[in-house]
């Protein structure tokens, strides 16, 4: 296995063109923190984007930042928070996670339910396709652009369409106050009912999570007087759940962190990421909990991190039955070798996605069989 370490976009073009000419395959990596996602890959050459690092342009008054795709997320977060700003979709990851990896994995944090997902914040990018050609999508300004919305397509593409070399993201002022209201020890049904009720109020809930047996969390972001008035409204309509504790940002941060990647769930069993309609989420996972599953719920119940050994087919069926999907987020190699990490798509969507992949990567340079579906490629 060769590890390519290009220093600029031209090197990326040359390496991909070389693979294309020689019939080779390339697994794209950023920080390489999720190489254990999907089928184990011990043979394919790797294209590391890590050296394409650094902020290219950051103008706080324009609320836009452009960086090379291999820039560590921590570096970007430090740069924007030093100017009182942040990424509203709350990207998260390990210390070495890069912004390219975050975008390719479609990673958004708790505030996704109020501020939108990564795809709503990626304004533009530069990338190299499987044809070895450099191309751009979107723009470097906050305005509508014409043509295909390629930035949305690249979010969650898991390195299968193109190697991102540069990305332009929206940034926003950080809310001056972040208040977390916390109810301890509510039963699951009550915790979910509380989140539903809070989400229906005209108080602009920023984030809502339920950590079973521990806490139900509602977060309000904004200016102090506005947060205080919205808190009073919530207190008034949620009295039946008891009086909540109030936590400031520093105090509540470890609790919100447990919503990322399953946090403190047992590390032994496989970890699933279930995307479900919030209203039906609890009923949908109830049989899985009866089988011994543990979970945490984010996005007001729309995102469930489930830890459960076995029952893979049932997990996928339960998610699909309510129109959701189940991603195998973490599992032993033996399971990842036989079970696709991504939830199988309906045939029409799968056919469409195959055509898109062929357009970006006609000879399958990025087809490393990570998702166990290359045999379907046309
Ligand atoms: C289901 C799921 C589970 C997660 N579990 C965890 C977890 O357990 N721990 C954790 O820390 N984070 C986790 N995350 C968060 C997320 O994966 C990371 O924050 C981020 O993707 C890692 O960045 P990286 O640079 O290390 O990516 P890598 O591990 O290097 O790559 C991740 C994916 O992005 C692609 N990619 C990377 N860079 C580029 C690029 N420049 N152009 C195109 N494609 C690229 C790769 O091909 C790969 O498919 C999870 C996310 C999801 C959606």
Image: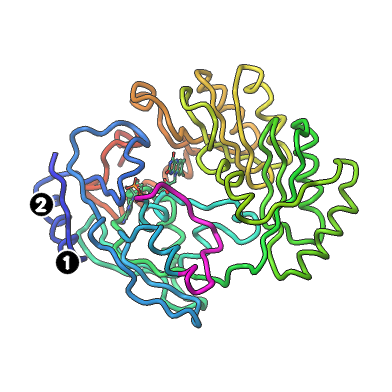
Which of the 4 image quadrants contains residue 221? bottom right
Mark drawn on residue 279: none
Image location of residue 145, percent across then percent down: 47, 76
Q: Which structural element holds mark 2?
A: helix
Q: Is residue 142 above or below residue 258?
A: below
Image location of residue 259, percent across then percent down: 58, 42
Residue tagged 1: 10
Q: Which structural element holds mark 1?
A: helix
Q: Residue at x 71, y 59 (%)?
A: 220
Q: CA distance from mark 1 to mark 2?
A: 16 Å
Residue tagged 2: 21
Bounds of the magenta segment: 80-96
Question: Within 10 angstroms of label 1, few (less than 14), some, or many (20 or more) residues?
Answer: some
Q: Is residue 93 magenta?
A: yes
Q: Main secondary structure of the magenta part?
A: loop
Image location of residue 129, percent across then percent down: 26, 59
Image location of residue 261, percent across then percent down: 50, 40
Residue 28 vs residue 181: left or right?
A: left
Q: Residue at x 81, y 58 (%)?
A: 231
């Amino acid at each position: 296995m060769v590890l390519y370490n290009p220093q600029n976009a031209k090197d990326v073009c040359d390496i991909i063109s070389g693979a294309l000419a020689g019939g080779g395959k390339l697994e794209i990596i950023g920080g390489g923190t999720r190489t254990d996602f999907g089928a184990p890959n011990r043979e394919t050459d790797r294209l590391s984007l890590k050296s394409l690092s650094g902020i290219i342009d950051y103008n706080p008054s324009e609320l836009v930042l452009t960086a090379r795709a291999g820039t560590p997320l921590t570096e970007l977060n430090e740069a924007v928070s030093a100017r009182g700003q942040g990424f509203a979709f709350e990207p998260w990851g390990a210390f070495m996670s890069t912004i390219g990896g975050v975008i390719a994995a479609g990673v958004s944090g708790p505030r996704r339910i109020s501020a939108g997902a990564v795809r709503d914040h990626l304004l533009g990018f530069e990338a190299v396709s499987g044809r070895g050609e450099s191309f751009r999508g979107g723009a470097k300004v906050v305005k509508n652009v014409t043509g295909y919305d390629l930035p949305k397509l690249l979010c969650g593409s898991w390195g299968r369409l193109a190697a991102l070399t540069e990305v332009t993201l929206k940034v926003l002022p950080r809310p001056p106050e972040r208040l977390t209201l916390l109810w301890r020890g509510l039963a699951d049904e009550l915790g979910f009912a509380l989140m539903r009720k809070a989400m229906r109020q005209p108080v602009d809930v920023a984030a809502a999570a339920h950590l079973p047996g521990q806490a139900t969390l509602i977060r309000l972001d904004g200016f102090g007087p506005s947060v205080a008035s919205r808190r009073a409204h919530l207190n008034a309509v949620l009295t039946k759940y008891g009086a909540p504790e109030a936590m400031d940002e520093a105090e509540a941060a470890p609790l919100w962190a447990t919503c990322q990647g399953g946090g403190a769930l047992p590390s032994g069993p496989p970890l699933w990421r279930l995307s479900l309609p919030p209203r039906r989420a609890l009923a949908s996972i109830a049989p899985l909990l009866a089988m011994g599953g543990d979970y945490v719920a984010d996005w007001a119940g729309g995102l469930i991190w489930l830890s459960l050994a076995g029952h893979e087919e049932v997990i996928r069926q339960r998610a699909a039955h309510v129109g959701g999907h189940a991603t195998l987020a973490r599992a032993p190699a033996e399971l990842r070798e036989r079970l696709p990490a991504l939830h199988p798509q309906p045939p029409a969507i799968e056919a469409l996605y195959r055509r898109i992949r062929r357009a970006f990567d006609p000879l399958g340079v990025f087809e490393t069989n990570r998702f166990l579906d290359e045999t379907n490629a046309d």
